[in-house]
Amino acid sequence: MDQNIQILVVGEDKGLQGEFEAALQGVSHRHCITSYASDYRRAEEMALNRQPNLICVDMEKDFDDLKRFTHEIHQMLPETTVAAMYRPDQFSGERSESAVVIDGVRAKIQDFLRHPLSSTELRQLLDRLYTPRIATPASSGKLVSFVSNKGGVGKSTLAVNAACLLATRHPGRVLLIDASLQLGVCSVMLDLLPTTSLVDAVREKDRLDETLLRQLTISHTCGLQVLAAPSDALEGSEIDDEAIYRILNFARRAFDYVIIDTFPILDSTVLSVLDLSDLVYIVMQGTAPNVIATSKFLPILEGLGVGREKQRLLLNQNYRSFTGNLSPADIEERLTRQFDGVFPYQKGILAAANAGVPYSLGGSTRFGFSRSLMQLTAEIELLGTSATRFRLKTHTESTWQQLGEFLGRWRRG
């Protein structure tokens, strides 16, 4: 599956959304995520939040407002392409179709589509623009999310411990965002009493920038910055997908690594997180019901544009072994897919969570759970480099040694 293409469609015509969606039906080889705005003011706000790859705007007879809009877009998002949609019979008299195109070019419009929109034209436009426009964002920060479709599998435990371990190596450069809006527990696991949260970032949206975002985070002694979850579900209802887009885009500019814990449900906010994530760690248990649920969850993620290259499947054995317990090999056979990481049971994890002292901040890093966590954080550190993807098999000593040697060479330059 290709990387997501963000498209913002702008126009007052109420039938425009249906026309555009119908044209997209014939572009099945691209995974396009479309948003719609009825006016330029709303479009500018959505463009700033979502940072689309392509903006398709209905061309009006009066070019002045369109010119102002395209000028603002090129100032805000110089890498975004603006294409105009027009009807060949829309302009008559002294203005021919070629004159309309020339006026559009002068208004910094880079491509054109004719109404009624056809799948062929839209596909050709995306083919022309895909390679240059779908690229690594200008900001350098890497976004990594932890997701599941069931609570209690240890998703938050892995997110918190990975963030803390990263922060010990990169103090002040790692942000943990608790985007579990209904029941965030990251602050409790870190023994922090938050005075600010994601809701404050939403309420300050008009003046939010990288500096203010840093001020809204809470510091942990390990060097980690935390943006806490809302205090309750009522506050959480103030946060929507637009707000999450905006916050994450500022976060990746302010921090080198952004770790995101999510709520185990595929709502609009989680979809926004998935869309912006460079890596998605899918956490599951080894119980039969969870295996069945995960077998259904994985194809859903791919259908949403989270391709295999972004997915990492983790088995978290956060319970004692018992007679009849499924082995990792049994689960892999059922899922027809290998695990990218296996985290063995560690009785000290629960005690650490109760004490608010992450397990990753103490003890050996050479065995069991800690060793798997070291491998996971090493992969996050290597995001954006030419490093080979390593599997995190806990029983493969040669893989661990190879990864350690590579990471050592990479850090030395």
Image (tube, helix red, strand yellow):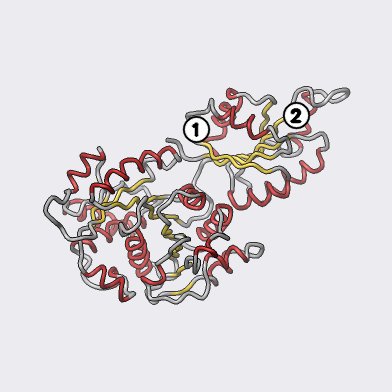
Q: Is residue 294 above or below residue 32?
A: below
x 22%, y 72%: residue: 363
Inspect the image, locate mark 2, and give the three-letter code of the amino acid beneath it.
Answer: Val
x 73%, y 29%: residue: 86
Q: Which mark is residue 339?
A: none
Q: Is residue 42 above or below residue 334?
A: below
Viewport quadrant of the C terminus = bottom left
- Disc 2 element: helix
Q: Dot 2: within a 10 Å radius of its alpha carbon, few (fewer than 14), some, or many (20 or more) residues?
A: some
Nearer to the camera, 210 or 384: 210
Find residue 409 and report its horizontal and vertical position in percent: 29, 57
Q: Quadrant of residue 300?
A: top left
Pointer 1: what residue? 30
Find residue 43 and report its horizontal and vertical position in percent: 68, 46
Nearer to the camera, 54 or 381: 54
User: Does residue 4 appear to the left or right of 300 in the view shown?
Assistant: right
User: Does residue 226 appear to the left or right of 15 in the view shown?
Assistant: left
Find residue 306 and report its horizontal and vertical position in percent: 42, 43
Q: Is residue 165 above or below residue 85?
A: below
Inspect the image, locate mark 1, and give the three-letter code of the amino acid beneath it.
Answer: Arg
- Disc 1 element: loop
Pointer 2: what residue? 101
x 21%, y 55%: residue: 400
Viewport quadrant of the N terminus = top left
Q: Earlier in the sequence, mark 1 or mark 2?
A: 1
Spatial CA distance of label 1 from label 2 is 27 Å
x 45%, y 70%: residue: 225
Q: Dot 1: within a 10 Å radius of its alpha carbon, few (fewer than 14), some, or many (20 or more) residues?
A: some
